[in-house]
Image: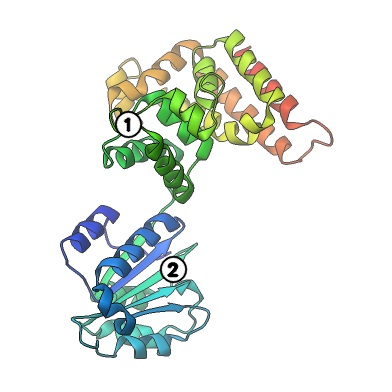
């Protein structure tokens, strides 16, 4: 896999908003959200509306060759400061030698945007990578980890002057997951529903707008397990069993695995009795975020946590049909929660 320059999405966007364009943007990776954001901004702002007819070209990697892209990029703009060429599905462009030659001597009046989704440049193409980096920006758009979703949600809403509490954040993250395009679409829908005088998202708002129960959701199940609240956990599991659309083992297994995996790591902290030290060990933004792990270490021994992680792996395999001819997802979920809490 190619190593991108140490350039962040925020840095690229800050330069674009300041009107600083480079000849080449090679945008690659498994998370299409950031690739689309950068490409769309360039398409909407690099040229004036009246300049786009003659100076903005959209190409598709499966329809053009590298030579055709390079030839288009070498053209001069017509009555404009620059031309913009956006190549979608750039991962389908074969035999990139012509592009490599172009990158070594790009046209300063062309902004060439290569959108390479669902992967990165073959790591063996080191000269190709170097030519891109010399010409402009090589950016890798990585999938967000589940633990990074709450921060993404908070920052996305903060930019829109909307506040949200921790429970609402986790409810949204658990229900929607790391599909950032869908996540931002749902957040935009929620923001539009808020009254002008009260831009705050609460669990009730999440329940009303996204359809996640504020009492029976992944956040509450996790909380019940962290605190070893058997009655509450069983209530939630019963609700999910009766309302399969509200939640299932497929959405909660990653949530629980992530928690117990981090809980196991917490035991190896240089100072596991210090909330600040555990938060730093887990690379969390604040000591407060480690509260659930401090509670978990009081309620579960290290040996029990190892056994739970093993059980989660077993249930995950069974949920996918391995060594499991007949047990349904609901029963597997009950089996797992019983094992964790007893």
Q: Residue furthest front?
A: 196
Compared to residue 156, the image places residue 260 above or below, namely above
Numbered circle sitting on residue 70: none
Which is closer to the viewer, label 1 or label 2? 2
Indicate the quadrant containing the N terminus: top left, top right, bottom left or bottom right.
bottom left
Image x and y of residue 296, in percent = 46, 16
- What is the number of callouts on the image? 2
Q: Quadrant of residue 158?
A: top left
Q: Quadrant of residue 58?
A: bottom left
Compared to residue 65, the image places residue 168 above or below, namely above
Residue corresponding to mark 1: 284
Q: Is residue 315 visible?
A: yes
Indicate the quadrant containing the C terminus: top left, top right, bottom left or bottom right.
top right
Residue at disc 2, secondary structure: strand
Circle 1 residues within 10 Å: few <14, some 14–19, many ≥20 = some
Residue at disc 1, secondary structure: loop
Residue at 62 percent across and 30 percent down: it is: 246
Pick whichever, 297 or 204, lies toward us. Answer: 204
Image x and y of residue 284, in percent = 32, 31
Pick whichever, 262 or 31, lies toward us. Answer: 31
Residue at 23 percent across and 85 percent down: it is: 107
Compared to residue 224, the image places residue 47 above or below, namely below
Q: Is residue 261 visible?
A: no
Residue corresponding to mark 2: 116
Image x and y of residue 305, in percent = 54, 22
Q: Quadrant of residue 36?
A: bottom left
Q: Is residue 94 left or right of residue 266?
A: right
| Cβ–Cβ under 8 Å for marks 1 and 2 | no
The mark nearer the N terminus, 1 or 2, is 2
Pick whichever, 19 or 251, lies toward us. Answer: 19
Query: Rounded to the nearest whole Å, what is the CA distance between mark 1 and mark 2?
Result: 31 Å
């Amino acid at each position: 896999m190619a190593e991108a320059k140490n350039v962040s999405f925020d840095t690229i966007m800050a330069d674009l908003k300041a009107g600083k364009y480079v000849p080449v943007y090679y945008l690659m990776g498994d998370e299409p959200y950031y690739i689309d954001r950068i490409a769309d901004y360039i398409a909407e702002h690099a040229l004036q509306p009246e300049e786009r007819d003659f100076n903005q070209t959209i190409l598709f990697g499966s329809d053009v060759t590298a030579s055709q892209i390079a030839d288009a990029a070498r053209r001069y703009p017509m009555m404009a400061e620059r031309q913009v060429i956006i190549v979608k599905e750039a991962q389908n462009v074969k035999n990139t030698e012509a592009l490599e030659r172009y990158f070594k001597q790009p046209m300063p009046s062309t902004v060439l945007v290569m959108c390479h989704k669902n992967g990165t440049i073959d790591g063996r193409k080191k000269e190709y990578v170097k030519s891109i980096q010399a010409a402009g920006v090589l950016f890798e758009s990585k999938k967000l980890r589940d633990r990074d979703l709450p921060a993404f949600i908070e920052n996305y809403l903060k930019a829109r002057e909307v506040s949200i509490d921790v429970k609402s954040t986790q409810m949204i993250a658990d229900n929607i997951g790391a599909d950032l395009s869908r996540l931002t679409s749902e957040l935009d829908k929620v923001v539009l529903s808020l009254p002008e005088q009260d831009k705050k998202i609460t669990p009730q708002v999440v329940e009303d707008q996204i359809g996640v129960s504020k009492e029976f959701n992944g956040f509450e199940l996790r909380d019940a397990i962290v605190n070893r609240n058997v009655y509450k956990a069983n209530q939630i599991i019963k609700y999910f069993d009766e309302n399969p659309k509200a939640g299932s083992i497929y959405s909660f297994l990653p949530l629980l695995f992530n928690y117990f995996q981090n809980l196991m790591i917490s035991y190896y902290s240089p100072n596991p009795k210090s909330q600040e030290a555990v938060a730093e060990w887990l690379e969390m933004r604040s000591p407060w975020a480690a509260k659930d792990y401090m509670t978990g270490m009081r309620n579960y021994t290290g040996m029990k946590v190892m056994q739970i992680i093993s059980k989660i792996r077993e249930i995950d395999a069974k949920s996918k049909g391995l060594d499991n001819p007949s047990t349904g997802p609901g029963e597997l979920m009950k089996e797992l929660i019983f094992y964790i809490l007893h």
